[in-house]
């Protein structure tokens, strides 16, 4: 990957930023199974999909179950997509389970069951976006790619740009900055990508950053500016109680916890607001997460 110079380059050299963060990571990195030396590219891919908008503590037990049951893409592809939805449990955003199943099928059909190591081939898999392709290429295959998730974007916004939060939508300038900081050696670049991500998860957190523990505190533009408060568009927290998301989760839970199709009253009883319940059920059907059967019953997809 060609290194670009950001529009507003940091006042410090890349090495003076990456070095301390890499050293911090060596001391403080969490022991996670998808980071283990024997982790497979498939295990990394599964973890990356599960970790989207979901904290590690919730992902760990589900990831363990998935990898025991489906240690390879072929193992998952051989089962109905509904089994992936069932095993997804309460991770939320269950369409991710369908995307993983579709990706497993494509890996079997196009790549002989092996997660591709080519970045473009990863991007071509169903449901795999720019972040996931870069993450798998970096963390599974030790390649050199800019990996920008929410944590990384927040760290770079504070460290380089001196603002509390990044823009709502990722910008080209953020990518350019991330590429500028990438070490030239691919394995070191891959380790840097996970290190800065870990710093955002453990220290440079969204609401209560532990700046005193930051290995680059003396270089942080946000800190040097006096930690100015965020002055952008209002940041709305996600609500859950009473939402369509919660209703969808209740309906899916009935299907996940029942062997075989269910009668409509079994779904009706879990949510009292009938218009919202029907809207949520229609959405689940449209998303391919629920199959309406000819006899009036409902089932997970096959």
Image (cartoon, rainbow, N blue to C red):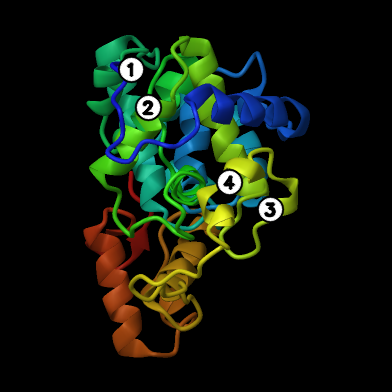
Q: Nearer the viewer, mark 2 or mark 1?
A: 2
Residue reaching furthest right? 27
Q: Earlier in the sequence, mark 4 or mark 2?
A: 2
Quarter-of-image position of residue 81? top left
Towards the viewer: 124 or 220: 220
Q: Earlier in the sequence, mark 1 or mark 3?
A: 1
Distance from disc 1 to disc 4, alpha carbons, whole Å, reads: 35 Å
> Is residue 75 at least partly visible in the picture?
yes
Vertical side of 11 occupied by 136: above or below? above
Q: Earlier in the sequence, mark 2 or mark 1?
A: 1
Question: Which residue shows up at 64% across the image and 43% down it?
Answer: 218
Q: Quadrant of the N terminus?
A: top left
Q: Position of residue 55 (x, y in %)?
A: 59, 51
Q: Label 4 crowding class (10 Å Cα cut-off): few <14, some 14-19, many 20+? A: many
- From the image, tell me which residue sits under label 2: 180
- From the image, tell me which residue sits under label 1: 108
Q: Quadrant of the C terminus?
A: top left
Quarter-of-image position of residue 168? bottom left
- From the image, tell me which residue sits under label 4: 200
Q: Nearer the viewer, mark 4 or mark 3?
A: 3
> Is residue 43 at least partly visible in the picture?
no
Distance from disc 1 to disc 3, alpha carbons, whole Å, reads: 46 Å
Q: Position of residue 299 (x, y in %)?
A: 37, 57
> Along the horizontal axis of the image, is 127 left or right of 241?
left
Question: Which residue shows up at 42% across the image and 49% down it?
Answer: 161
Distance from disc 4 to disc 2, alpha carbons, whole Å, reads: 19 Å
Asked which secondary structure carries label 4, the reply is helix
Q: Nearer the viewer, mark 4 or mark 2?
A: 2
């Amino acid at each position: 990957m060609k290194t670009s110079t950001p529009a507003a380059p940091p006042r410090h050299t890349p090495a003076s930023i990456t070095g301390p963060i890499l050293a911090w990571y060596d001391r403080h990195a969490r022991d996670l199974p998808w980071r283990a030396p024997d982790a497979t590219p498939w295990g990394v891919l599964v973890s990356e999909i599960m970790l989207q908008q979901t904290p590690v503590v919730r992902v760990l037990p589900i990831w363990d179950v998935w990898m025991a049951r489906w240690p390879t893409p072929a193992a998952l592809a051989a089962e109905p997509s509904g089994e992936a939805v069932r095993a997804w449990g309460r991770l939320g955003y269950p369409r991710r389970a369908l995307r993983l199943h579709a990706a497993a099928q494509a890996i079997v059909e196009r790549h002989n069951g092996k997660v591709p190591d080519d970045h473009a081939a990863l991007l071509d898999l169903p449901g795999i976006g720019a972040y996931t392709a870069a993450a798998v290429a970096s963390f599974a295959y030790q390649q050199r790619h800019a990996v920008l998730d929410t944590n990384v974007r927040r760290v770079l916004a504070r460290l380089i740009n001196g603002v509390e939060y990044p823009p709502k939508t990722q910008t080209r300038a953020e990518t350019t900055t991330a590429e500028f900081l990438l070490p030239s050696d691919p394995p070191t670049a891959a380790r840097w990508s996970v290190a800065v991500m870990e710093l955002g998860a453990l220290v440079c957190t969204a609401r209560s950053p532990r700046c005193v523990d930051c290995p680059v505190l003396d270089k942080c533009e946000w800190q040097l500016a006096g930690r100015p408060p965020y002055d952008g568009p209002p940041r709305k927290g996600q609500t859950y109680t009473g939402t369509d998301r919660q209703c969808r989760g209740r309906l899916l839970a009935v299907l996940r916890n029942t062997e075989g199709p269910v009668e409509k009253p079994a779904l009706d009883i879990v949510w009292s607001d009938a218009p919202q319940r029907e809207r949520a059920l229609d959405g689940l059907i449209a998303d391919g997460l629920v199959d309406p059967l000819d006899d009036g019953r409902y089932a997970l997809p096959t």
